[in-house]
Image (cartoon, grey):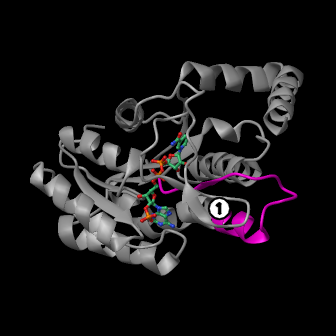
Amino acid sequence: MQLKNKVIIITGSSIGIGRTMARTLSAQGAKIVLNARNAARLNKTFEQLKSEGIDCIAVAGDVSKMEDCEKMVAQAVAAYGGVDVLVNNAGISMEGSVENLDPEVFRKVMEVNYLGSVFPTKAALSEIKKTKGSIVFIGSVAAFRGIPDYSVYSSSKNALTSLAEALKIELSDAGVHVGIAYVGFTENDPEKTIFNADGKIIAQPKRDFIKAESPEKVAQRVAKMIANRRFKHVFTPLGKLNAIMTRFLPGIVGFVLSNNYKKKKG
Ligand SMILES: NC(=O)c1ccc[n+]([C@@H]2O[C@H](COP(=O)([O-])OP(=O)(O)OC[C@H]3O[C@@H](n4cnc5c(N)ncnc54)[C@H](OP(=O)(O)O)[C@@H]3O)[C@@H](O)[C@H]2O)c1
């Protein structure tokens, strides 16, 4: 699929990977629908991207609310006449053991990462069927194996695999592309936040010990997935190693995760 003049909704695009994807996909000629909950920050991004010559609109809304997703799609259609691609990018992470996590963190992470991918998909589906376009889920290499202290984040990204697999078959006669990107560790936006165990929003702790990919590289990989209508794509060499090891040598992966966890806990 050529991206020139395609209308692309990117959820969670006021900062981070989503905002970078807006720039990358626009550079290939796409029209962008930006989205996030914080309207003031979204508007700042919208103004910045407009000043860079990017053809975009911004629709503030929460992807875990069906009515907000319907409004987002309606505004995309009103502005551009249809929708070609939906990138389900909005997501939130957390840190804390199952024992210590506030139950609300489980609910909120699943609401944003899982329902927040289901609802935009349902809202945009009839439009995307008309254009025989694409629906892409932004998953994570954390989906392959439950990661200690990131249980609900891993679960929510794992759930996207089943969602994408089911949807791909359901849409096989409709000519719609379904893809899922297993994104590896990515350089974080300075404004990125996560939930702590108490359910408070905190700044993402530094992860200097991990080699991270640039958001530009992630965005280029997603653009290529859309263009080539690729189904599953695991990003980064570490992500690929993780996927292969988890499949063929799960005991070793368990051993490494367990050892690292014990070291972390001292
Ligand atoms: N960074 C990584 O290392 C990494 C690795 C693998 C996968 N990923 C995945 O890549 C995606 C983007 O990650 P990122 O690091 O770029 O995140 P980020 O910097 O924290 O940005 C998240 C974006 O999503 C928006 N958002 C959050 N909740 C939302 C909701 N309920 N409705 C609408 N928008 C919402 C945020 O704005 P508001 O708060 O204003 O809504 C923001 O624009 C996520 O799905 C993440 O899980 C990231």
- Check the image and report above or below for 247 versus 164: above
The percent position of residue 261, horizontal first and vertical second, equals 82, 35
Using the image as rendered, state which of residue 10 and residue 264 is in the foreground.
264
Q: Is residue 219 visible?
A: yes
Task: Using residue 171 as the reference point, say whether residue 150 is left or right of it.
Answer: right
Residue 107 falls within the magenta-colored stretch? yes
Using the image as rendered, state which of residue 201 and residue 222 is in the foreground.
201
Q: Quadrant of the C terminus?
A: top right
* Residue occupying the point 71% across, 20% down: 244
Task: Using residue 247 as the reference point, say whether residue 237 is left or right of it.
Answer: left
The percent position of residue 158, horizontal first and vertical second, equals 70, 46
Using the image as rendered, state which of residue 119 and residue 104 is in the foreground.
104
The percent position of residue 225, horizontal first and vertical second, equals 42, 34
The percent position of residue 65, horizontal first and vertical second, equals 52, 76
Residue 103 falls within the magenta-colored stretch? yes
Characterize the local packing of mark 1: few (<14), some (14-19) or many (20 or more) Cα atoms within 10 angstroms: many
Task: Using residue 101 as the reference point, say whether residue 204 is left or right of it.
Answer: left
Q: Residue furthest front?
A: 266
Q: Secondary structure at mark 1?
A: helix
Task: Using residue 235 as the reference point, say whether residue 79 is left or right of it.
Answer: left
Is label 1 within 8 A of ligand 1 (CB to nearest ligand atom)? Answer: no
Q: Quadrant of residue 38?
A: bottom left
Q: Which residue is mark 1?
A: 109
The residue range painted magenta reads: 89-110
Three-letter amino acid code of the residue under disc 1: Val
Using the image as rendered, state which of residue 133 and residue 263 is in the foreground.
263
Q: Quadrant of the N terminus?
A: top left
* Residue occupying the point 33% across, 72% down: 39
- Check the image and report above or below for 170 versus 40: above
Q: Is residue 133 visible?
A: no
* Residue occupying the point 12% across, 48% down: 52
- Check the image and report above or below for 35 versus 48: below
